[in-house]
Image: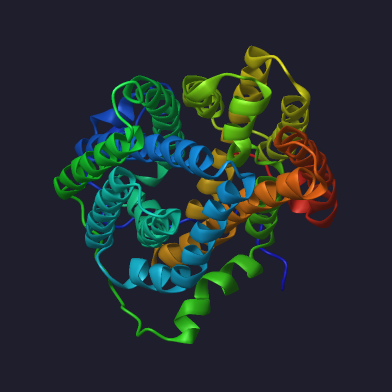
């Protein structure tokens, strides 16, 4: 692995396929954070993403609630992450190859159709009270489709806006994701609390709503005019599959950022255990679970709004390291809290600082990667971050089970130990990464 060229001097190519009319938005972009919404394709892209993520986040609450109600096992919650991680590992490399060698828009549309079919499956399974193994099967299918969707979706964004506006596009894209992640869990939890008074299958209604959300996103993306044109398609081979890995390992800055985020997500995530905290520690029920799920993305939304009205970060590397450290500290305090609104505030803080990490990493990865490699690099990035997210959920559930039921303690005790130890591990990760990758500390303006 050789030393990467300085990010300040590394050229990033103009996004091919970008809407020519969008070039008019470049002038004065820094002074007008909302100028990017003059771009017709970008507006449709954001609306579709808003609706799709809204439905998916409602499903996250519904699945967690239903599994814990039916099994009363933190390990059952952890297996959700393990199931989704296996799907990502199996599909990531071909997903990246397809994103670089086929029309990215078509890949997005096909993936959305698969997600909608899996949501119909979850609806039927929940309504019939079928074995929970079938729930995991549908989650595996959804995760596989999303694995193909992620690299195509991330790389396709560069075709919608000119390079100068891309950092703002990432900020608004992240903010839209987090806005849906705020409304989705809160709405999902409230609907479950309401519907369970009238039905024995409240989660089934949530899954049906996600089916409609996926179809709405399909319509929006179908209406986007921009297309991805493949100039030099490569045959599917092991060499092509390995391109994303080779590029990332050659770029020390990108490798360090991905490593930091990967281990921070793996160790510091508390979201997989929120059903345990809501029911057994904070005594807040399904509606409280929805609020807790919404707290972290709510912090991200407000942070995204703040960043959208500010110039690009001038010391992006140091901001990244400090924000991940604060993420670990807030996670520790959340694990020790017994007051609902204080726990909510700590999750809110986690979301705010995590959004800085998302913006810095995603902007850097896309701008420092040539367009012909963006799909495969995005796929590898998704593999590292996505699998650490899902495997982190399994790790949290397993540690909670190990220090809880396995040692004849309560689920609450195991959950607290899992979350607090994960926060400590996140802080230690920052120290190690800052020492091994000094390039991150020196990384300057994000643009």
The location of residue 25, given as percent across then percent down, is 30, 33
Report whether 99 appears left or right of 393.
left
Horizontal arrangement in the rendering, residue 79 relative to residue 395 (left or right): left
Q: In which image quadrant can residue 58 be found?
A: top left
Q: Is residue 267 placed above or below 315 in the rendered structure? A: below
Q: Position of residue 105 (x, y in %)?
A: 24, 57
Which of the image's four quarters has the N terminus? bottom right
Residue drawn at 68 percent across, 38 percent down: 320
The correct choice, above or below, for 186 with respect to 72 in the image is above
In-front residue for pair 72/61: 72
Q: Residue at x 50, y 37 (%)?
A: 69
Where is residue 86? Give x, y as percent. Answer: 52, 66
Which residue does the image show at 35% across and 24% down from the upper left?
A: 191
Query: Quick check: can you spot residue 81?
Result: yes
Q: Is residue 377 above or below residue 303?
A: below
Residue 225 lies left or right of residue 196; in this view the side is left
Q: Position of residue 277 (x, y in %)?
A: 64, 29
Residue found at x 64% / y 63%: 251
Residue 187, quarter of picture? top left
- In this view, the residue in front, 142 or 258, is 142
């Amino acid at each position: 692995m050789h030393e990467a060229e300085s990010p300040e001097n590394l050229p990033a190519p103009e996004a091919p396929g970008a809407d020519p009319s969008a070039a008019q938005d470049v002038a004065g972009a820094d002074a007008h954070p909302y100028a990017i919404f003059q771009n017709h394709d970008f507006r449709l892209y954001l609306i579709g993403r808003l609706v799709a993520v809204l439905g998916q986040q409602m499903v996250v609450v519904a699945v967690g609630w239903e599994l814990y109600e039916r099994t009363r096992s933190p390990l059952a919650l952890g297996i959700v992450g393990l199931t989704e991680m296996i799907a990502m590992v199996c599909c990531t490399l071909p997903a990246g190859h397809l994103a670089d060698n086929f029309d990215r828009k078509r890949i997005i549309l096909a993936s959305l159709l698969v997600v909608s079919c899996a949501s119909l499956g979850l609806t039927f399974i929940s309504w019939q009270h079928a074995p929970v193994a079938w729930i995991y099967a549908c989650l595996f299918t959804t995760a596989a489709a999303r694995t193909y969707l992620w690299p195509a979706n991330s790389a396709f964004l560069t075709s919608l806006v000119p390079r100068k506006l891309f950092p703002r596009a990432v900020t608004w894209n992240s903010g839209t994701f987090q806005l849906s992640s705020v409304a989705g869990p809160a709405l999902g939890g409230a609907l479950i609390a309401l519907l369970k008074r009238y039905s024995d299958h409240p989660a089934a209604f949530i899954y049906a709503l996600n089916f409609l959300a996926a179809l709405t996103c399909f319509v929006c993306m179908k209406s986007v005019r921009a297309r991805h044109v493949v100039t030099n398609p490569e045959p599917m081979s092991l060499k092509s599959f390995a391109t994303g890995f080779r590029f990332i390992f050659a770029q020390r800055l990108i490798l360090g950022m991905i490593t930091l985020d990967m281990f921070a997500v793996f160790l510091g995530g508390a979201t997989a255990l929120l059903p345990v905290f809501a029911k057994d520690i904070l005594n807040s029920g399904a509606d409280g679970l929805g609020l807790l799920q919404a707290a972290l993305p709510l912090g991200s939304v407000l942070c995204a709004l703040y960043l959208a009205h500010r110039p690009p970060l001038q010391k992006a590397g140091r901001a990244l390291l400090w924000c991940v450290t604060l993420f670990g500290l807030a996670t520790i305090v959340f694990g020790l809290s017994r007051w609902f609104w204080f726990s909510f505030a700590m999750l809110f803080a986690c979301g705010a600082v995590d959004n800085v990490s998302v913006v810095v990493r995603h902007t850097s990865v896309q701008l420092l990667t040539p367009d012909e490699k963006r799909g495969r690099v995005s796929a590898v990035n998704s593999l590292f971050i996505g699998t650490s997210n899902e495997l982190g959920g399994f790790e949290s559930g397993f540690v909670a089970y190990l220090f809880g039921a396995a040692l004849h303690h309560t689920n609450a005790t195991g959950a607290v130990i899992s979350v607090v130890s994960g926060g400590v591990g996140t802080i230690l990760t920052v120290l190690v990464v800052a020492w091994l990758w000094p390039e991150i500390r020196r990384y300057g303006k994000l643009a």
